[in-house]
Amino acid sequence: MTDRTIRNLAHLRRSASTARVLNLLNVYNEYGRDPDWAARPLFRTPALNRALIIKHRLRRDEMDSFRDRRQVATKIVIPIDASDLKTGGRYVFVGQRGFNRIMQEAFGLPPGHQDMTTMSLLDRLPSLDPFLLREQLKRGGIELAPCYLSISECDLKRMVLFVEDEIRPLVTLSLGEGLGAVGSTRRLAGKILSNDPRDRMEALRRTLRLGEDEYEEGMFCWKGFLYYKWVLNSLAVEIAAVADAVATVKPVGKIDQGSREYLDRGRTVLRARIHKTCQDVASTLGIYDNAYAGLTVTGQPAGFREFLLDAPRLFTRLGEQLGAIQHVVSFWRFRFSPGASMVSPEELIDIFMDFETGLAERDQEPARIILAA
């Protein structure tokens, strides 16, 4: 299938990846001569390892491409011309009807190939956030070169400190206050963030009366909740700044009446959707907060057990919600950074429509507009 709408993302040619877009072409351009890039790739197939991976919100006419009902799909886009993304690309959705046949015909990949496994792992994630991407691939036995992941050691350290603060009530409940509790907090944080099978915290699993598979999946999603909570706290100021900037950003160049009307409407709608999505994220995180408080404050594990059992579904919802917000913030940070070129009316419309699609609720799609020639 040919995707001409990639023109809306042509400016990603120079940008870093976001929670919604993993730009492997940009990684190749920057690190293609780095031995580690080739030694520990995301995909072994060269064309796939230079693709754009996009968490795409399905439109109504695309949902029938899947046997299961879903709102977001993982889109693999192979650019027609790697030097000019405006020419479009060939794309396929992971898991769509006939997916195995398409991959066999296009790339010679059988169902059991490592790249097919990797695509399945990516498809199970609600967003392409680098921290969760790294954790998911480790679970699948894939050790990815750091150049593929736009996450710094500094961010990882801040994340660990946040997790330590978050789980301190659990350690205090078990050990009480004191130096011993401090050391136990760090060890427990390490276990939560670890992918080592030896760090499964069997005592907690038995307390919660969970099977090994239920516990492993629940713990991964708990890790995801902790990370997303940290992300929301970290982005709070930027989210507000972007929402304010949407109201004032001006394109350069001639603008027709239809475009002007769309942008005027888009400012109001987009700001409202940013605020609404943030509220939805906070509401989903509140489910975890209540369950965790029940465990650590009242000593009742039943609620937290139910949270871990329901965590995969909640994790998907949370990831889609916050992933859309992360994409808006990170892309706005890139495109409207100091020194960046001014946007044309057409490009600003593309950006607004892209953001609206990502932030849309079920059965919502952004308004369409026909640009004057």
Image (cartoon, rainbow, N blue to C red):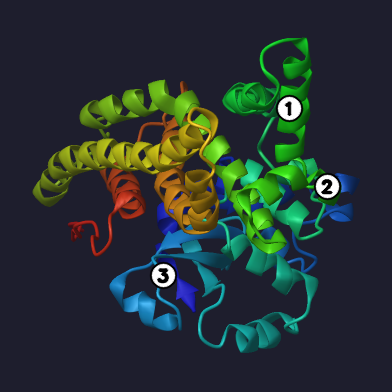
The residue indicated by pointer 3 is 70
The residue that appears at 34% across and 23% down in the rendered structure is 241
Residue 73 in percent (x, y) is at 48, 66
Q: Amino acid at mark 1?
A: Glu
Question: Which residue, given by chain and number where applicable, does mark 1 sit on?
Answer: 153
Q: In the displayed structure, does residue 36 sit left or right of residue 304?
A: right
Image location (x, y in percent) of residue 64 = 37, 82
Read off the residue under disc 2.
Answer: 196
* Quadrant of the image containing the C terminus: bottom left
Disc 3 element: loop
The image shows residue 31 at horizontal and vertical percentages of 78, 44
Q: Quadrant of residue 123?
A: bottom right
Measured in 3D between alpha carbons, the distance from the residue under mark 3 to the one under mark 2, in whole angstroms, is: 31 Å
Does residue 17 appear in this view? no
Q: Which of the two marks, 1 or 2, is nearer to us in this view? A: 2
Which amino acid does the dot numbered 2 rest on?
Asp
Which residue is nearer to you in this view: 189 or 256?
189
Tell me if label 1 and label 3 are in contact, CB under 8 Å.
no
Q: Within the image, what quadrant is residue 159 found in?
A: top right
Horizontal and vertical percent position of residue 188: 73, 31
Q: Marks 2 and 1: in contact by CB < 8 Å? A: no
Q: Say whether residue 318 is left or right of residue 273.
A: right
Residue at horizontal 76 percent and vertical 37 percent from the top: 191
Q: Does residue 290 appear to the left or right of 21 in the view shown? A: left
What secondary structure is marked by label 2?
loop
For the residue pair 288 and 25, the one nearer the viewer reads as 288
Q: Is residue 203 above or below residue 66?
A: above
Q: Which mark is residue 242?
A: none
Q: Residue at x 57, y 50 (%)?
A: 128
Three-letter amino acid code at the position of disc 3: Arg
Question: Mark 2, residues whose alpha carbon is within 10 Å: few (<14), some, or many (≥20)?
Answer: few
Task: Tell me the CA gap for discs 1 and 2.
Answer: 20 Å
